[in-house]
Amino acid sequence: MAIASSGIGTADIETASAYDVERVRADFPLLRQTIEGQPVAYLDNAATTQKPQAVIDALVRFYTEDCSNIHRSVHRLGERATEQYEAARGKVRTFLNAASEREIVFVRGTTEGINLVAQSFRSRLAAGDEVLITGLEHHSNIVPWQLACEATGANLKVAPLNEKGEVDLDAYRGLLGSRTKITAFAHISNALGTVNPIEEMIRAAHAQGVPVLVDGAQAAPHLPLDVRALDCEFYAISGHKMYGPTGIGALYGKEKWLERLPPWQGGGDMIRSVTFEKTTYNELPYKFEAGTPNIAGTIGLGAACDYLQALGRERIARYEQTLLAYGTELLCGVPGLRMVGTAAEKAGVLSFTMAGVHPHDVGTVLDSLGVAVRAGHHCAQPVMDRFAIPATTRASLGLYNTRAELDRLAAGLRRVGEMFR
């Protein structure tokens, strides 16, 4: 499902009106606080999201009632901790619609998931091979592939962007070939909100026999996901982007690919047996889960999956789309403001510059008004280079944001314009 940046229909309006955002907001304790005497308007969701009470309670419950290590314990606490940890794996499997829990590897987040694949994939790369990414990527989907290429002599290829911040699909297809060993791209851009046509991109890669990794960090909180329908080989998500804890995420991998790849890290649960002469690796998914994991975070991630599933991801997507359309119209009416990233298919990101004002100054003024946004290159410096700017101010939307908060954002930006006139 792709979210368009305009063209809201009657069904969308009806769904948005049925979406009780105030009831949703009541689930998030942090939103009750004030900053500079104003209720906090948190518009930095692409960086991290706030946590509902259900997730907070899951973390507290584990540490106060069930805190123990997992898998090899024979006592009651260890058994309960293991049950909750593995139950969370089942929840992530359902969330992504993976075929098996063997295909769900717990990692620290999307960054570690991509690094896991990139480092393990070194065994399949040689001098002259190619890795294909796009000009839209977060640094976490650039640097791991640079490291893999440097270590193996492979070459990194980049599909360019057009003026709207969309991947040039013709160029992308033209770069796929017999030397391409893997392609990796974002589902949604964190810097611009562009929703990539990943179904088409995956089909083009598979037509050349090329496996695909999708960076799903920004998609997981906004879109219904079905990795089997997408047919990608790998899909990585981060808990903290989807209303879960920091320091936890998951990598989906097709079972046949996880079986082929060697483990990235060693120790702990990833072994079946160890001698000084040889180590036999554990079965999936534990082959890729070295050391004591973030048990509490994993349980919290499971609670976040439950929360999003109960709220309804289609409903969330449609509600956020109405916010995006409203916010886009508001900001386009602010004097001196230039929107950066105007793709036909977008999720809830409003990235912009203000004439004559540094993005950090914009963010500072907005903070004084209780409006939290992000200013900088958003760990996507090549995207900024493409548009010949050092940085943008970015307001990113979540399921608890409101039109009133966007009104405050627009009013704050008008004040910025007046202050720096």
Image (spheres, rainbow, N blue to C red):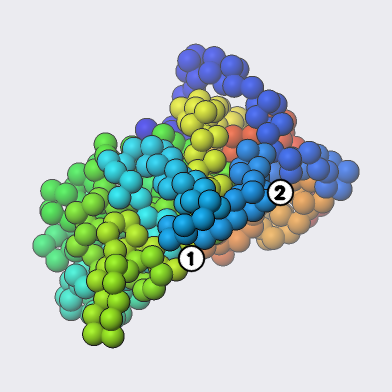
Q: Residue at x 70, y 26 (%)?
A: 22
Q: Reading the chain from its start, which is encountered first: label 2 or label 1?
A: 1
**Helix, strand or loop under label 1:** loop
Indicate whether 322 appears above or below 369: above
Residue 231, horizontal then vertical, whole percent? 24, 43
**Residue under the image location 35 percent in, 50 percent down:** 104
- Where residue 405 appears, x then y in whole percent? 71, 35
Which residue carries the number 2 mark? 372
Tag nearer the camera, 2 or 1 = 1
Left of 31 or right of it: where is 329?
left
Q: Residue furthest bottom?
A: 276
Depth check: 335 or 409 in front?
409
Which of the 4 quarters of the picture holds residue 377?
bottom right
Could you tell me the amino acid type at mark 2?
A: Ala
Q: Is residue 71 above or below residue 15?
A: below
User: Is residue 264 depicted above or below 172 in this figure?
Assistant: below
Query: In the displayed image of the protein, which residue is found farthest to the right?
Result: 37
Is residue 156 among the parts visible in the rendering? no
Give the class, few, some or many, for how many residues have Cα within 10 Å of label 1's Cα (few <14, many ≥20). few
Give the left or right position of residue 329, taking residue 156 as reference.
Answer: right
Image check: 328 left or right of 285?
Answer: right
| Of 96 and 377, the residue lying toward us | 96
Where residue 169 appears, as percent x and y from the top left, is 27, 48
Residue type, numbered disc 1: Thr
Task: Write the residue at 60% across / 55% down.
Answer: 67
The residue identified by callout 1 is: 292
